[in-house]
Image (tube, grey):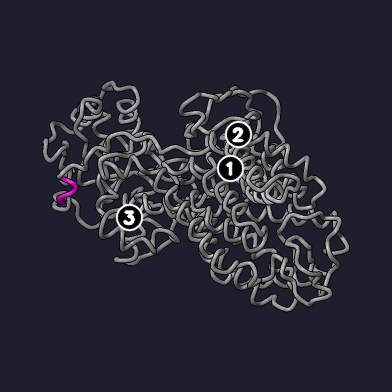
Amino acid sequence: MLTGTADSGDTTAPATQGRIVAQRRGEDDPAQTGKDKGSIAADSDSATGGRAGRRADRLALGSYLLGGLWIIAPLLIHYGRTMPSKPGDRAQAEWFLAWAARFVTHGGNPFHITQLNAPSGVNAMANTSILALGIPMSPITLLFGANVSFDILIVLGVAGSAAAWYWVLSRHVVTNRTAAWVGGLVGGFAPAVTSHAQYHPNLVAQYVVPLLVWRSFKLLEPGRSVRNGLILAALVVFQVFINEETLFLAALATALFLLLYALQRRDLVRAALKPLAAGLGVAAGASLVVLAYPLYYQFLGPGSYHGGEPYMTTFRMDVLGLTTYGSNSVAERFRQYGSIPLPFGAEEHGYFGWSLILLLLALIVWQWHDIWVRCLTITGVVFSVLAWGNPLLVKGHSTHIPGPFALLEHLPLFDTLLPTRLGEVTNWAVTPLIAICAQRLFELQGLAGRTRKILLVGVLGAALVPAAPMPIKTVARPPVPSFVSSGQWRDYVGPGRTVLVVPLPQWDFEAGIYWAASTDAALPLSHGYFLGPADGIKGHHAFVGPVPRPTDKLFSTAMWQRVVPTVTDADREQAKADLQYWRVSLILVPDGAKWTASRLTVEQLFGPGRATGGLTMWDVRDL
């Protein structure tokens, strides 16, 4: 099997019993001993490291957990009263967590949502419904609320991603636990993970990725194709219900790495092709048994779409992004080292900063003779360049220069991809790179032990500390109106009826989504924040939110321009027809001066409302 410790690819041991064995951990030649301790496929007892190793493991896991708590510290200090400064996608994630809990208690179709977008509903498989996270967290959601589940998932996602990388690195890639710990820091705390802490628990939860890669390498092991294939299939199914995009990227990255390795070590790869093919066949077959219907529903069911939302597919990494620090990093927060305008905070893939990039360049040049370093470097660079998207973005300015992603952007699956997220693979390549090279630094000869340690701490600290994440920025979280939290709304909304919240729930106007999430998704919304087909026609490209109806345009004018549009009698008649289409029984507008235009617009359409419990309501059941 492909091994994981840093050693020259040119000194790799010969294949034994069909394995690709690389001598990277310094054990005896497996051809002589019959043991493949250094193989990434091996479950080596020596890798556990005895009592000292277990202590190191506990320290590593504890530090990662503290790091996860550090990132959400501002939320913990004033719990329940603050939220991230740009909460739109967080509101959506909280709603999906609430909906998963509702599914557990009420049943129904887990792949179709009826609590949004009346009367059509929403294709849950075509959205980030995070069932693999929401269902296990449902007891917490039901007892304490979706916001608590969200924060727990962020901490566990950051710490778990770092811990998973640490485990794979320390057991199968390097022998030095400190080197593995440093790699885990990059794997769990780089901007590709922590920039999503405000919004996306599905993209923070990258702990399956190193396991997917490891188990993919295990497929090269002869004689265990069924066992290895079934384990990989279980991981694939789990990841599908966390985030399919991450799974797609992990598959592409692993395939490219193995291809690069095969091109350089054809003699070793040839013997592994048969077990690899058999294992992949088992994994694919077992996965499809579970995923056939969910995937059918996603791509061909009601509310399915083909092709991404046009604006979102323009999210791409700046050409200078790798040398720029993330917006929430130590360097950017205190010294403003950033050389380019940063994205809005949730899509900072790459963004390692110049100090870490300079260190990586030096280490790569130094260790270029190592086949793993070469393969990891090329993989990371390829995906970083693809993350530039099309056209290229330079210093925050869009150019007319086509990017390499232009060759892929119209292909199936690639056409729904946010190009910037290809940069996640760069982070996955850097994680073992930094661990392998850190071990080589620890093995340097010619320096006294204490001098070497001081030098290493200084070098790694200078590279990593400026890029380290700071706690997320927060703002006050408006309380849920008592009219909603007390359940009074239920007196007005019968079965099959919905609630219209103005401003319409969107990324920028999250109040209605938070309200519905606080009721464990019991409050049925006529609209919502989701992806569906453009024009409501199955198979069209993705569109954010429901298909706009005429009355929506009046509400949008009030929401975005903060002015009251002119309302005619024809508009009033159309508004009644739209309410009937949406099956609305109740209209709610939050209190606050910034919603005055929205409130007055609803008044012009339906007459005066009634102020109650932190909002203004209109009972429109008679309409």
- Residue 236, magenta (yes or no): no
Q: Secondary structure at mark 1?
A: helix
Q: Which residue is mark 2?
A: 317
Residue 534 in sight in this render: no
Q: Quadrant of residue 511?
A: top left
Q: Secondary structure at mark 2?
A: loop
Q: Which residue is mark 3?
A: 98
Q: Earlier in the sequence, mark 2 or mark 1?
A: 2
* Left or right: 354 as drawn, with respect to 312: right
Count of numbered badges drawn on the protein: 3
Looking at numbered disc 2 in the image, what kind of residue is underneath it? Met
Q: Residues within 10 Å of mark 1 (few under 14, many from 20)?
A: many
What is the magenta range? Answer: 483-487
Residue at 75% x, 67% y is 27
Q: Earlier in the sequence, mark 3 or mark 2?
A: 3
Task: Where is residue 204? Give x, y as percent.
Answer: 48, 49
Residue 554 versus residue 419: which sits nearer the camera? 419
Q: Which residue is mark 1?
A: 421
Residue at 71% x, 59% y is 4
